[in-house]
Each structure stands twice: as C-alpha cells, then as structure tokens.
Image (tube, rainbow, N blue to C red):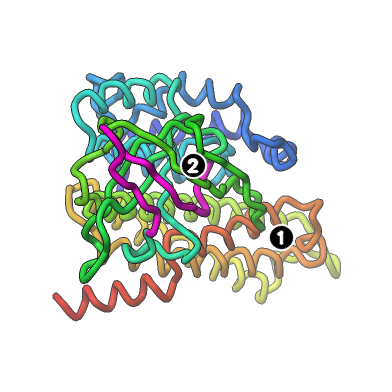
Amino acid sequence: MDMGLSEIQQMLKNSAREFLAQECPLTLIRELENDPTGFSEDIWRQVVSLGWTGIPFPEQYGGTGGSFLDLAVLVEEMGRALLPAPFFATVVLGGLTVLDAGSDDQKRDILTGVCAGTVRLTLALTEPSATTEAWGVETQASASGDGYSISGTKLFVPDAHAADTIIVAARTMPARDDAEQGITLFLVPSNAAGVEVEQISTIGNERLCEIRLNNVSVGAGAVLGEVGQAWPVIERTLARATAAHCVQMVGGAEAVLDMTVEYVKQRTQFGRPVGSFQAVQHHCSNMATDVEGARQIAYQAAWTISEGESGRREVAMAKAWCSGAYQRVCSLGHQCHGAIGFTMEHNLQLYTRRAKVQELSYGSVHDHKEVALQEIEAS
C-alpha cells in the first residue's frame, strides 16, 4: 500500500480544508449546536455544488466516479472541521448501500438525487439492544397485500430528522438458528404514515434520532436488495462506515494537536512559553504519535476497502486503535491547556465531547478487539 496521496487527492484535501476553514469555522459549530436541525442549509448547498456528495458514485448518476479512498480523504477534513451536515448519513451510510444493493431503477432514482443534493438518506439499523450484530434486529416486516407492514423501534439513527428516505433493516422471517438470515432492507419515506422521528440528546450534540415505526406500509418496490438476504450488505455497509468513521476521528485528533501546539507556543509561564518545558513537549510528542499512528491504520482500512476487500481485520484494528487514540489526544490536550481547556468557552471541548460519541459509535473498542483476534486466529 502506498500511503502517499495522489495529486488529485491532495488537491481535494487542500481545497476541502480551505473551504471548511472559511465557511465552517468553530464559531458556526457553536451556533448550530443550539439549532433544531443542527446544520446549515446554505453550507449543505455549497457542499453539493462542490461535487462532494457525488465523489464515490458513477458518472451515470451524476457522480465523479471516485474511489472509497478519495472519499476518505474528504471525510478526514470534515472530521477536522466538525462539519455539521447530513453528509455521512446520506453518502456513506445511505448512498453506498443503495449503490451496493439497489436495482437499476433504485440507483437511478436515488443516487441521481444524492449527487444533486435533492435526496438525503440515512440507515436505521440499531435497536434498543444497542448492538450492531444481526441478533439485535427485531423490527418486523410482515407481508401485507402487495407490500409489507413494518413495526419496530430504531435508535441512534444519524440525521434521520433531515432524511427524505430511511433505509430500515427489518425481519421478514424469524431468526431461528441463524440470526443473519431473514433480514431485509427497506426504503421508507420519512414522511410515510406511521413514521415518528425524535432527536436524542447526546454528549457530542450530534443529531442522533429515535425512529418509531407503527405499521408503516411500503410496496414491494421498497425492498432494497434480496428479501431475507440483507445481512451481507449490512456488513459491507458497516465496514465502510466504520473505516470512514476512523478517518473522521483522525481529522478531529489532528485538529486538537494543532490547537494544542499553537497554544503552548503562545502561553507563557515563569517567563517562558510553556511549550519549552520538557513535560509539555513529551505530551505533544505523544499526541503527534497517536495522530500519525491512527492515520496510518485508518487509511490502511480505507485502502483495503477501496481495493474491494472486506477489510474485516483492518477495520476492526483501526476502530479499536483510533477510538483510544482520539481520547488520549484530547486528554493530553486538556492537560497542556490547563484550566482554560476545561471550560465550555474554549473550543477544545467541542472535540472532546465528539470523541466520546465516536468512541461508542459503530462498535466498542472491546468488540473490535474481539473481531481482530478472531481474524488473526483464523489466518
């Protein structure tokens, strides 16, 4: 694997950083934390106009035909800027799932809208069990006339309040001996009768939602992929989302490192910059080591997926490491800042709160270490 970025990827990275620094400063992030929608429609339109929503999709749908690695480069910069927009839910969770499992008509109708910014998606998988394993899917989809009736509750669904269509995982057959069998994906309009969406309060102020499905009727054309055979699709979706999530954490961790280094250069104590003290230098060195280590392992996972492999081992290792690395970088950042770093008035807390949410998203550190161990033992 070549860890260097291509010329086009470097241009994408530079332009994204410049745009986000100018149009999405941390002052805006603070303002939008108190906004009911949590994002700016104006920034969303600009994101679409830049072609970002079409990066991983074929040109026939209005995309640019980029790779997953191209997308990862962009997502890292979004993590650095804490971009408040339904990009991840629409493109990574929703759009790539439709590209993976959708029919030709579904791809044409939905992905064209995603690339144009007229369609927003999300994926509703997790339920009150809080697991992303197959046994946690208990929402039921019963045959009803020419379609299905869906009932159940979904939790921690990102940006569902802003989605036009929700991809819902539900059981069309009992689990019995194999929980992975009998799960089907459905394209459910967010305004369909019986769909209730409510935002959940989180420490990071991300817009995660609870979705209640009360006998929601959908036609047979709402099935995404094969009936009862959705779990392999979901596994691929989770692998992509987790890898992108890791790269997003790298971006946030790097922002904390840069913020901290700049602060210790300027803050003086005992007549000299605090950054000149060895203990502080060691903290910054440890932070930099964690950031670069996380970047290497996160991009290894993204590259593996971009090459068409499952990336099960690489993704698990990346999530287990990046979750802890982001937490450690934030912790040392607070120590280097001293008292000011523990106030809500300082921007450091914006990253620390999100680091905690991201640590818990897409599987815990323990879960991913178990998966990595299984893959190592099987190799």
In the rendered view, does 195 fall on the left or right side of 205? Answer: left
| Quadrant that contains the C terminus | bottom left
Task: Give residue 216's quadrant in the image.
Answer: top left
**At 39% across and 35% down in the image, what residue appears?**
217
Give the class, few, some or many, for how many residues have Cα within 10 Å of label 2's Cα (few <14, many ≥20): many
Quarter of the image for residue 37 reads: top right
Picture disc at residue 264: 1
Q: Which residues are magenta?
A: 138-159
Expressed as whole percent of the image width and height from the top left, the position of residue 7 reads 31, 34
Q: Secondary structure at mark 1?
A: helix
Q: Which residue is mark 2?
A: 77
Task: Pick whichever of labels 2 and 1 is earlier in the sequence.
Answer: 2
C-beta proximity under 8 Å, tags 2 and 1: no
Q: Position of residue 212 (x, y in %)?
A: 52, 47
Measure how far apart labels 2 and 1 are at the Cα level: 24 Å
Residue at the far left in the pictured view: 379
Q: Residue furthest right?
A: 270
- Tag 1: residue type? Val
- Residue 203 against residue 148 in the figure, above or below: below
Q: Can you tell which of label 2 and label 1 is closer to the viewer?
A: 2
Task: Confirm whether residue 50 shows in the render.
Answer: no
Q: Residue at x 22, y 23 (%)?
A: 105
